[in-house]
């Protein structure tokens, strides 16, 4: 179990994409990571695009980014809601600044566009938000996974296997 002793924050909000939340949740646990589901409100149930519930372990304003090795942000429409939460945006910016893994798939880079971390970085996403990322200063690439330092991005649910391999490799190397 490569990630034993590592803690990863998995972000959650309403309208999350089911595969992009649950696949990382179980893969990270399978590798021994402590997965902490972080959302605006602790203990609240959030529903996916298809209505599948997930419950937050912690509220974003109550966690310390120094206590994790990385953040994984699932897509769906949830990133558009996440980026309205100042504490969630702050966690991403702080994690990135500390060299921790920041991983976002599909529409999740919407969240990154609301931070200051994309300028001069290479990334990918679902094609429909390409302009948002370019306007935030990123160099957008149409590749299944793009790793630029501690930033890991992927395009869509089909890219989950290589995305999670990159995330697990990255988290394993972080302090």
Image (spheres, rainbow, N blue to C red):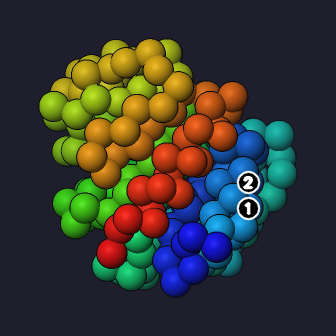
Q: Picture coordinates of residue 169 (x, y %)?
A: 47, 56
Q: Are marks 2 and 1 in contact (CB under 8 Å)?
A: yes
- At x 73% / y 61%, what residue is drawn? 26
- At x 57% / y 80%, what residue is drawn? 4
Report the quarter where the N terminus lies: bottom right
Badge 2: few (under 14), some or many (20 or more) residues near its Cα, within 10 Å? some
Badge 1: few (under 14), some or many (20 or more) residues near its Cα, within 10 Å? few
Look at the numbered disc 2 and give the secondary structure of its residue: helix
Nearer the observer, 119 or 158:
158
Q: Picture coordinates of residue 7 (x, y %)?
A: 50, 76
- Answer whether residue 108 is visible to the viewer in this image: no
Please tell me whether residue 23 is drawn above or below residue 50 in the rendered image: below
Please tell me whether residue 130 is drawn above or below residue 149 in the rendered image: above
Report the quarter where the C terminus lies: bottom left
For the residues carrying marks 2 and 1, which lies nearer the camera in this image? 1
- At x 27% / y 57%, what residue is drawn? 96
To which residue does mark 1 refer?
26
């Amino acid at each position: 179990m490569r990630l034993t002793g590592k803690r990863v924050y998995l972000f959650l909000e309403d309208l999350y994409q089911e595969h992009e939340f649950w696949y990382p949740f179980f893969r990270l646990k399978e590798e021994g990571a402590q997965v902490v589901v972080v959302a605006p409100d602790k203990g609240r149930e959030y529903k996916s695009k298809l209505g599948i519930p997930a419950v937050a372990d912690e509220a974003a304003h109550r966690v310390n980014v120094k206590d994790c090795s990385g953040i994984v942000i699932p897509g769906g429409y949830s990133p558009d809601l996440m980026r309205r939460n100042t504490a969630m945006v702050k966690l991403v910016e702080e994690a990135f600044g500390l060299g921790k893994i920041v991983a976002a798939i599909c529409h999740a880079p919407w969240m990154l566009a609301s931070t200051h971390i994309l300028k001069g970085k290479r990334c990918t996403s679902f094609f429909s938000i390409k302009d948002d990322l370019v306007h935030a200063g990123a160099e957008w690439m149409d590749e299944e996974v793009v790793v630029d330092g501690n930033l890991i991005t992927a395009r869509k649910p089909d890219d989950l296997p290589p995305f999670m391999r990159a995330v697990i490799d990255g988290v394993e190397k972080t302090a």
